[in-house]
Image (tube, grey):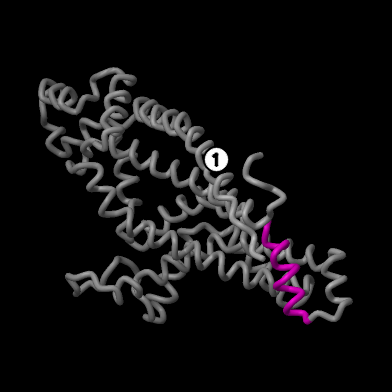
Amino acid sequence: MSRRLPWGAMARMTGRRALTAVPVLLGVTLAVFAVAEASPFDPVKAYAGTAGLTASQENLDQIRANLGVDRPLLTRWWEWLSSALTGDLGDSTVMRRPVAEVIGERLGWSVLLAATAFAVAIVLGTLLGVLAGRRRGGLLDRAVSSAAYTLEAAPAFWLGLLAIWFFALKLGALPAGGLTDTASDTVTADQVARHLVLPALVLGLSQLPWFFLYVRQGVGDALDEDPVRGARARGLRERTVLTGHALRSGMLPMLTLVGSRVPELITGALLVETVFSWPGIAAATVTAATSVDFPLLAALTVLATAAVLLGNLLSDLLYGLADPRVGFDG
């Protein structure tokens, strides 16, 4: 008989987390405006560009008033927050377009890259972790563990440059960057898939070591437990012992990684997008930070914070479903 899913407890946990997220997001947005206020970059000069070099002080002051950056910090923050709650994220002072439009046209590509890379990390990390955990200390375990520790120490941008040199320049097997081929003016699924391979593989490999090490340790420890030994003594096949006993209990700790790796995934995605010229939010984030683009910078920061909070919620929900002893009301 199948166990009914505790939808009520899950809904209560989600509601509690949503209430907790409100002050967190408010504090994050206020911190963004405070940091931008203390930044040495002048948003007026970034907005004016080269014309600002010859503009008079009167014209610069007028631009400062038009942009609203001459008003107090709390006033600017409250005005932005009030508009954001109504769905108006304001206009990007550097890109001179609505913030919602800037994010909307880039967010989908970033989500595609991050989701594909996360899937690569989870699938490969789980598979290799199970194989290594079955025979800890063996040749496969030593080889994959050494590779995992090497990848753990390697920066994502370095892996990206190495992948471009080998697969794109040396072998010519995959494109070096972008979303479509240079001669193409249309976006097709085939071109997107080919251009996605290298950045998704690099980003996935940068996240793989943690999933591999958690699964390896969990499966190895589970195989040494008394219930698993008892299952083997009863004559159950090794595959049944592994999938029905060791794999389930051994993968429980890995579920906590789903949320805890989201910040690293976002940071890695920004680096990988830059290396491979992937049209995600990386370029917008860099531009917003260096130009003190208050509306765009605040919206991108809230988006990243919300992704982290959702990741943590997802990991707790998955852990509660996988292990009923944990529950959702604690």
Vertical arrangement, residue 157 with respect to residue 288, above or below: below
Q: Residue furthest front?
A: 1
Classified by dominant secondary structure, the portion drawn in magenta counts as helix
Vertical arrangement, residue 290 with respect to residue 126, above or below: above
Percent x, y of residue 146:
68, 67
The reply to whether the magenta stretch includes residue 267 is no
Vertical arrangement, residue 19 with respect to residue 103, above or below: above
Percent x, y of residue 76:
28, 24
Percent x, y of residue 102:
24, 48
Quadrant in which the C terminus is drawn: top right
At a point 39% along the width and 39% down the height, the residue shown is 302
Query: Total marks drawn?
Result: 1
- The three-letter amino acid code for the residue at tag 1 is Arg
> Residue 93's image quarter?
top left
Left-right relation of 193 to 316 = left
At a point 35% along the width and 73% down the height, the residue shown is 193
Mark 1: which secondary structure?
helix
Residues in magenta, as a range: 237-252
Vertical arrangement, residue 277 with respect to residue 11, above or below: below
The reply to whether the magenta stretch includes residue 247 is yes
At a point 28% along the width and 29% down the height, the residue shown is 80
Quadrant in which the N terminus is drawn: bottom right
Left-right relation of 233 to 317 = right
> Residue 208's image quarter?
bottom right
Q: Dot 1, how many residues are within 10 Å of its Cα: few (below 14), some (14-19), or many (20+)?
A: few
Percent x, y of residue 251:
67, 62
Left-right relation of 276 to 183 = right
> Badge 1 is on which residue?
12
In the image, 120 versus 323, the foreground residue is: 323
At a point 70% along the width and 73% down the height, the residue shown is 243
Left-right relation of 186 to 216 = left
